[in-house]
Image (cartoon, helix red, strand yellow):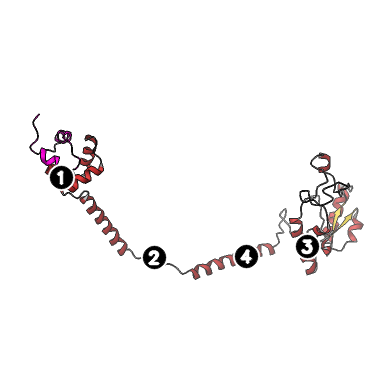
Amino acid sequence: MAKSPHHEDFMKLHLFKEEYIQELEALGIKSPEELADALQSEDTVKLILDQLKGVGPKTIEHWCEDLGVKEGEPEKAAATKTRKVKVEKAEKEPKEEKKPKAEKTEKKAKAEKDKEEAEEKEEEVAIEEEGGYQVKLKPTIPDDLADALKKRGEISGRRPEFLRQEWYKRTRLQQHRWRRPRGGHSKMRQHYAYRRNVVSIGFGGPRAARHLHPSGFREVMVHNVRDVEKLDPKTQAARIAHKVGMRKRIDIEKKADELKIRVLNRSG
């Protein structure tokens, strides 16, 4: 088979084989000059990589160096153009002035203040529409008693649940009232760390707030209208006994409304 007139020039290229000459001719590349022109476009480079076995990106880089071709020159030029355009646009567009943090914090504080004031107004307004919600009566108690009630709520929130000894063995003990543990070998009575807490003086609330309703009233059991008339509306609230019938219950509630006494277990 006759050799190509540019055989020697092709063989000077790095890692070039004789087989590549025929394959390049099939692609229309017959001389090193034509190969140099072809290497400047991406499409022809892809065709060369597909057709020529054993040719990779590194071999093409070596060929570009041997032929004096700078690969990807047109792409770089396009990229520099786009970058220039972006820079010009950025210069033309004015930058948004950042608002100082002090103004933002002031606005935030003002918004929070307005929200708090609105909530306070809603609490102060009493809804007295027919069939609507009516504000419940509140007791008149001193400040120290109000603090004691607040403290009692905090303590009850963190107080553990006191369970009977061996409650996990017998289901009937889970619903029974508390009884202190007895027994010479009882680990619960001896306050072992891996046993449940036992009722002790440290878990109690303030003495002043004991036996008070969460609202602050002192509960008084009521059986008839005469019992309601004896109550102090400022400090005491009525709790109707469960044996009282509906007819007498309605009379008690009417009388309590007249005297402005709070009923803790109303029928409606």
Mark 3 or mark 1: name the one nearer the start of the chain: 1
What amino acid is at disc 3?
Answer: Leu
- Where does label 3 land, which residue? 149
Callout 2–callout 1 Cβ contact below 8 Å: no
- Where does label 4 land, which residue? 116
- Where does label 2 land, which residue? 96
For residue 81, which numbered disc appears in the image? Answer: none
- The answer to whether 194 appears left or right of 111 in the picture is right
Q: Which residues are magenta?
A: 1-26
Badge 1, how many Cα within 10 Å: few under 14, some, many 20+?
A: some
- Residue 39 x/y as whole percent: 19, 44
Asked if 36 appears above or below 92 in the picture, the reply is: above
What amino acid is at disc 4?
Answer: Glu
Q: CA distance from mark 1 to mark 4?
A: 78 Å
Q: CA distance from mark 2 to mark 4?
A: 33 Å
Quarter of the view holding residue 86: bottom left
Asked if 172 appears above or below 110 in the picture, the reply is: above
Q: CA distance from mark 3 to mark 1?
A: 93 Å
Mark 3 or mark 2: name the one nearer the start of the chain: 2
Asked if 222 appears above or below 99 in the picture, the reply is: above
Callout 3–callout 4 Cβ contact below 8 Å: no
Q: Residue at x 25, y 56 (%)?
A: 80
Question: Element at badge 1?
Answer: helix
